[in-house]
Amino acid sequence: MKLGPGLAGIVKLAIVLNVYGATPASANSWTAPNVDGGKSWKDAFAKASSLVNNMTLAEKVNMTAGIPGSCVGNIGGVPRLNISGFCLEDGPAGVRPLHGVSQFPVGLTTAATWDRELIYKRAYAMGKEFYDQGVHLALAPVTGGPLGRAPLAGRNWEGWSPDPYATGVASYLSVLGMQDAGVMATAKHFIGYEQETFRNPYNLAEVYAVFPANEQSPISSNIDDKTMHEVYLWPFAEAVRAGVAHVMCSYNNLNGTQACQNSFTLNHLLKTELSFQGSVISDWGGQHSDVDALIGGLDMAMPGSGFGGVFGQFWSELDKLVENGTVPEDRVTDAALRVLTPHIWLGQDETPLPEHVFNALPTLYDAPDMYKDVRQNSTAELIRKIGAEGATLLKNTGGLPLQNPQRIAVLGNDATDNALGQNACGGAGIACPLENLNGTLSYGGGSGYAYAPYIITPLDALKERAIQSGAEISAITVIDNFESAIQSLVPTSDVTIVFVSGWATEFQDRPDITLNNNADALIAVAVNYSSNVVVVMHIPGVVDIEKWADNENVTAIVAAWLPGQETGNAITDVLYGDVNPSGKLPFTWAKSLDDYYPDTIVSDPILEPQANFTDGVFIDYRWFDAQNITPRYEFGYGLSYTTFEYSKLVVSEPQTADSSLFGSISLDASAVSASLKLSSSGFVSESDSIQDTAEPFTDSDGSNSLYDVVLQVTATITNTGDVIGSEVAQLYVSIPGDDQPVRVLRGFIKVKDIAPGESSTASFDLRRKDLSVWDSVKQTWYIPTGEFTVSVGASSRDLPLSMRWSP
Ligand SMILES: *[C@@H]1O[C@H](CO)[C@@H](O)[C@H](O)[C@H]1NC(C)=O
Ligand SMILES: *[C@@H]1O[C@H](CO)[C@@H](O)[C@H](O)[C@H]1NC(C)=O
Ligand SMILES: *[C@@H]1O[C@H](CO)[C@@H](O)[C@H](O)[C@H]1NC(C)=O
Ligand SMILES: *[C@@H]1O[C@H](CO)[C@@H](O)[C@H](O)[C@H]1NC(C)=O
Ligand SMILES: *[C@@H]1O[C@H](CO)[C@@H](O)[C@H](O)[C@H]1NC(C)=O
Ligand SMILES: *[C@@H]1O[C@H](CO)[C@@H](O)[C@H](O)[C@H]1NC(C)=O
Ligand SMILES: *[C@@H]1O[C@H](CO)[C@@H](O)[C@H](O)[C@H]1NC(C)=O
Ligand SMILES: *[C@@H]1O[C@H](CO)[C@@H](O)[C@H](O)[C@H]1NC(C)=O
Ligand SMILES: *[C@@H]1O[C@H](CO)[C@@H](O)[C@H](O)[C@H]1NC(C)=O
Ligand SMILES: *[C@@H]1O[C@H](CO)[C@@H](O)[C@H](O)[C@H]1NC(C)=O
């Protein structure tokens, strides 16, 4: 991999010394490279340099150490030089914690759309709300921490997919979208943060605590170098390429060293290898020291001395530490530059942000009395569209789309309003009681929760629709003693739609994958009295549906995820066929928790808990493929109301490719299952209408870049059914080598609105990195020798087109 300008020599030496050293990650062994603005931020960096050069030590410290203030995080700024302070706020799916904002679909829902344009538009609309609320720095997007290694992890829904490529694309587009709206984005949580249990037994009592705070180490994620590069670091590399302003370090340890003072991950991987030019921000409570954190690569202490110092008063005496020679001033200067440069790059220094209405909170999670409406008229429509496009049709034996039913039974408490207020789960009351979630579930809980301005419940929307079509609709929403009510309502209904849910929240991992609120019993009764039961699930990931999924009376199953405020409208669009479902699973849906890689949540009550990532690169579908385990629904799976056929796989070398590294491609025509045509014409960018506005930091010299497109692939998709529909075409690559997964996702595109009988072309760009693996001895990416296979199809296990070649 190309290194940042000027650093290559130093870094190579460091690598040689450390690769063979015993402790690659010890706190102080990797020095922080000084920022230089990289390629994209040169002008902003020059301006930041002239300002920082004129700052006193106290002023530089004011740019890096959080202070008490009215936002969840506050940077003081330098009034003497007319540099404003920063307001920092959560979260990944909307501005928190105030009212007057939208409750967007969560990351998982958006990931299930596989729609690059919608991912970007959501990020832009969200970024605009942050900006209009006067937030300089948004604590979003989740960029693969958690990635989703553990199906039970409490925060997977805040992110995207356990596949690093998919999460990489989503993170890249989210950073672009948010920053195009003027707000600084933060890729989080760096890195290896894959469970809530034992995440941070430091300063604050956590719900899972078994030892008093500070007696116990956080969970240590022990990740080998190959897995780090090919899986967990991958999405962060994409966020950096997109020009992300900041990166938030996580709570956990890595190989025994805490993430916010880990010089290997921060100074080496992030700042040197990825050439990241922005600042590293601590998660609230993630900073455990003054000196080791600064030397280890942290640039911004959050919340520093905010919140009455409950997280530790870190860096409140940073000036004294410099003055008495404990830490070098250069490091503080570098940190101030990293904080200030992206602020200038986005023009926040020249155009002041709108005034904000945040007011200092006694705690982090109480719903405060803060309100300023910044919602745009078009946003509700976008939220509804993402909810509908993300809804994933898992089973359909004729239940959907609804054929103008005249008598509709609706079952389940998830169909209706939360009787305790629409923000009672996830808002002020962060922890919903697991056994009786109240009302429809539009979100998970914790700092990823955004306050809903309203909730259109499934029942609200279905009623409106039923009234329009002159139908009768009746709902049973109790969670027990429902038998006789069901017995009297259901047998005379044309269709019975059951709404069920599963809760997940920050702070604790899910105890199991069982649906909440007695849902299995509810469905068991429903199928007893109706031969047309449609099940809709509002869930944060996999749930156990084995008791009823194969029941012949269950005629359709839809995973509607966590869709935000427009939840009812979105699902009604899908149920009635106004939107033909095109969502697909961004993770593997197993039949049993036992089918996933074992023990991914470490909960042994010991002082130094260790999570050994022994699954390596074999996460999610890669594990199921390698072990030949049949899942209930595979990664990438999802049905439509129409059918699609794949044909005409074309693999070509782009005209601009430099073939010296890649070699010449010899195609094995006998293995091609569709017509073979070598051509370099007809190139359509995979990134659809979205332009890459930020230049990658890593392409320092432009040639032989890891991110050059070396192969272009197209396939023809034909709608062979009766209704218009969109199809998520997926491209997988089998990379040769004994230690490689059977196949890995390396391209996807939603081919939109194909009319019956019509065809469209799906185009994919494969970059050099997409065909490479990491050599941890040589510390470089390389394209292995041997036979590659490129496959294109509808899911990770439905790949009708493939082609083999040996570079
Ligand atoms: C900073 O100081 C330099 C001289 O060291 C001066 O030329 C420059 O104008 C100053 N810039 C600002 C923004 O004060
Ligand atoms: C630090 O920021 C605070 C808040 O904006 C400001 O009052 C104070 O003057 C700043 N300190 C310095 C040294 O600039
Ligand atoms: C953890 O240790 C392994 C084995 O020595 C090494 O390959 C890896 O780079 C280390 N990772 C981190 C984050 O320190
Ligand atoms: C330097 O200053 C810090 C902060 O006041 C203090 O904690 C530390 O003991 C001092 N170290 C030396 C060597 O004086
Ligand atoms: C201070 O910065 C603001 C933008 O934040 C700008 O409008 C104003 O003109 C600046 N004032 C001076 C004295 O440079
Ligand atoms: C949004 O809708 C309201 C009410 O219909 C209207 O008054 C307003 O002008 C609209 N705003 C924009 C920006 O379209
Ligand atoms: C929701 O809360 C209301 C009011 O406390 C209660 O009557 C109802 O049983 C609750 N529903 C569930 C499913 O817990
Ligand atoms: C289903 O119906 C049968 C026959 O009426 C009854 O015996 C059984 O208990 C019912 N099962 C459920 C789950 O309601
Ligand atoms: C399906 O529903 C019918 C009633 O419509 C019932 O008689 C039958 O037992 C049910 N079958 C199953 C497998 O539950
Ligand atoms: C993790 O790996 C270390 C080193 O191989 C080993 O000593 C330890 O027992 C492992 N811990 C767990 C929980 O598997």
Image (spheres, rainbow, N blue to C red):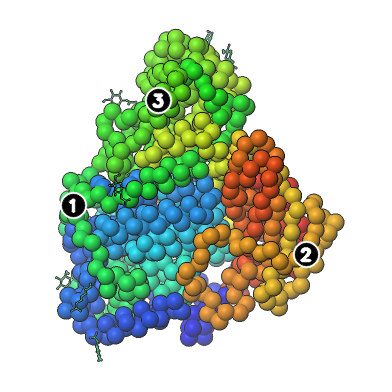
Residue 178: mark: none
Secondary-structure class at tag 3: helix
465, 352: nearer the viewer: 465
Circle 3 or circle 2, nearest the eye: 3
Sequence-first tag of 3 and 2: 3
Sequence-first tag of 1 and 2: 1
Secondary-structure class at tag 1: loop
Q: Position of residue 495 (x, y in %)?
A: 51, 20
Circle 1 or circle 3, nearest the eye: 3
Residue 463: mark: 3
Residue to which mark 1 is pinned:
361
Q: Position of residue 106 (x, y in %)?
A: 41, 46
Residue at figure coordinates x 44%, y 76% from the top left: 40
Q: Amino acid at mark 3?
A: Lys
Residue at figure coordinates x 66%, y 75% from the top left: 656
108, 720: nearer the viewer: 720
Left or right: where 389 falls relative to 212: right
Residue at figure coordinates x 74%, y 49% from the top left: 647
- Asked if residue 415 is positioned above or below residue 525 in the image, the reply reads below
Residue 807 can be seen in this image? yes
Q: Amino acid at mark 2?
A: Leu
Residue to which mark 2 is pinned:
678
